[in-house]
Image (cartoon, rainbow, N blue to C red):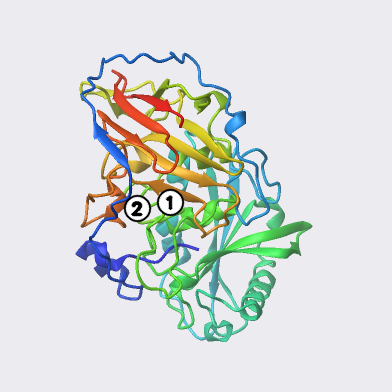
């Protein structure tokens, strides 16, 4: 389920397009925590040298691969959960458009298709470096549901009884028109103008007992109740759940306050409204989009020097090099450095900036975050660590300005509070990669 829209931070044009039906973000203090961190500026030129072992090839990632646990959408990467389709090949998705007897649709299915495609396919193509293609197969006509939209009590916290009734009716209505055995993913898209449709209710429904249709077990489906036009990248967020990715936002118990305190703008699963919504390198590792040599497991107590490619750099993507001019040729180097900190925890380091899906990123540098494979979806399985806890950035556009300037910038060093792990960002290469030194605690 997507996090809710931070109305207060969207530009006026976006507000007018989306309407006023979403939750306005609660008040946020601008005071910053004075956590015991060590962020120091170092006089490091791009060509400076530090006495440290040279790393020509990344270390094997296996010692840093956290074990997958039983929690919902575990961030473990040692094995793949076979209950979910892995997006390591092209996958086919059927889009079924559902109308209701209490409302005459005001939009055509083709219009709703363009709300989500090709943007969703493009996002995943960039994120996967071309390894995954999502192929939509939309129906041309509305499929009538047997009951009024108001009969299903559609809402964000949907009751199991009403949800089950909706899914049974949707499957029965669609089965006459769809051969479900041909598809890997099912999107049920409701008429956005029906009176009982609530855009906050969009989510992936995982079934304990699969539904059976056309000789195929259907274990999950995406129920789409979006407005027209919808939230940006909302279908990409929901499709991430289909691939076993967790929600990274924090939902306050009282529904008030910030939802984005865990990862801010830095991953689609935290916020589809983020300035830098590309998936974390950890998620790309989990999904099979990074080769083993692209993940460096940093061990021992001494410093290790690495060259990290920008996470968004891939085939055909231009990256600003050290001289500022566009440079190509990146995409197959090291994308992620990891320091294991416990049986189910690790620190991850990756280079982020205005590249690919992150074209609107607020700040560039090396992003540091903590991963916990034992934390379930929505309970902070990933948390970005702020290298600049006393400042914030991009107040007008960021979903959570305190983390918008979280990356360690060029020429800076940062020691992770409570871990003693230190990262120094030494320079940029001609091709635009980042030279860093990581010292475990």
Gap in angstroms between the C-alphas marked 2 and 1: 7 Å
With respect to residue 314, does 87 lie above or below?
below
Would you name the residue on which mark 2 appears? 274
The reply to whether callout 2 and callout 1 are in contact (CB within 8 Å) is yes
Spot occupied by residue 42 in the image (x, y as percentages of width and height): 23, 27
**Around disc 2, counting alpha carbons within 10 Å, would you say few (fewer than 14), some (14 to 19), or many (20 or more)?**
many
Q: Residue at x 51, y 45 (%)?
A: 371
In depth, the one of 148 and 310 nearer the eye is 310
**Quadrant of the rendered image containing residue 221:** bottom right
Q: Residue at x 30, y 73 (%)?
A: 19
Mark 1 lies on a secondary structure that is: loop
* Residue 207 seen in the current view: yes
- Horizontal relation, residue 241 to residue 317: left or right: right
* Residue 317 seen in the current view: no
Q: Earlier in the sequence, mark 2 or mark 1?
A: 1
With respect to residue 422, does 382 lie above or below?
below
Q: Residue at x 25, y 62 (%)?
A: 9
**Around disc 1, counting alpha carbons within 10 Å, would you say few (fewer than 14), some (14 to 19), or many (20 or more)?**
many
Numbered circle sitting on residue 228: none
Would you name the residue on which mark 1 appears? 268
Mark 2 lies on a secondary structure that is: loop
Spot occupied by residue 269 in the image (x, y as percentages of width and height): 46, 53
Q: Residue at x 59, y 54 (%)?
A: 242
Spot occupied by residue 210 in the image (x, y as percentages of width and height): 74, 63
**Quadrant of the rendered image containing residue 206:** bottom right
Spot occupied by residue 324 in the image (x, y as percentages of width and height): 21, 25
């Amino acid at each position: 389920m997507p996090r809710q829209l931070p109305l207060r931070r969207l530009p006026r044009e976006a507000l007018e397009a989306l309407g006023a039906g979403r939750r306005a973000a609660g008040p946020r203090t601008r005071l910053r925590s004075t956590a015991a961190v060590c962020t120091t500026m170092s006089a490091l030129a791009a060509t400076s040298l530090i006495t440290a072992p040279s790393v020509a090839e990344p270390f094997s990632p296996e010692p840093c691969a956290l074990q997958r646990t039983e929690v919902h959408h575990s961030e473990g990467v040692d094995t793949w959960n076979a209950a979910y389709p892995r997006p390591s090949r092209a996958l086919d998705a059927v889009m079924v458009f559902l109308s209701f007897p209490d409302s005459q649709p005001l939009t055509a299915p083709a219009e709703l298709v363009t709300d989500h495609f090709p943007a969703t396919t493009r996002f995943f193509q960039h994120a996967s470096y071309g390894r995954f293609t999502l192929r939509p197969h939309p129906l041309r006509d509305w499929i009538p549901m047997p009951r009024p939209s108001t009969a299903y009590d559609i809402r964000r916290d949907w009751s199991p009884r009403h949800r089950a009734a909706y899914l049974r009716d949707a499957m029965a209505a669609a089965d006459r028109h769809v051969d479900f055995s041909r598809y890997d993913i099912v999107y049920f898209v409701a008429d956005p103008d029906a009176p009982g449709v609530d855009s906050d209710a969009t989510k992936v429904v995982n079934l304990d007992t699969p539904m059976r249709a056309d000789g195929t077990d259907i274990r999950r489906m995406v129920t789409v109740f979006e407005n027209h036009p919808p939230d940006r990248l909302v279908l990409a967020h929901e499709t991430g759940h289909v691939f076993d990715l967790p929600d990274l936002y924090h939902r306050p118990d009282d529904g008030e306050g910030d939802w984005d305190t865990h990862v801010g703008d830095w991953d689609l699963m935290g916020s589809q409204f983020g300035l830098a919504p590309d998936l974390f390198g950890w998620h790309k590792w989990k999904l099979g989009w990074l080769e083993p040599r692209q993940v460096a497991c940093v061990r021992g107590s001494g410093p290790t020097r690495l060259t990290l490619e920008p996470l968004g750099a891939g085939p055909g993507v231009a990256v600003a090099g050290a001289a500022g001019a566009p440079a190509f040729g990146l995409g197959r180097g090291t994308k992620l450095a990891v320091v294991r900190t416990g049986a189910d925890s690790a620190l991850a380091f990756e280079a982020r900036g205005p590249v690919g899906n992150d074209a609107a990123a607020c700040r560039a540098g090396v992003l540091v975050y903590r991963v916990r494979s034992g934390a379930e979806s929505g309970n902070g399985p990933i948390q970005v660590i702020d290298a600049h806890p006393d400042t914030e950035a991009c107040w007008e556009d960021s979903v959570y300005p305190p983390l918008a300037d979280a990356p360690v910038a060029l020429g800076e060093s940062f020691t992770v509070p409570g871990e003693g792990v230190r990262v120094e960002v030494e320079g940029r290469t001609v091709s635009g990669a980042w030279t860093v030194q990581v010292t475990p605690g």
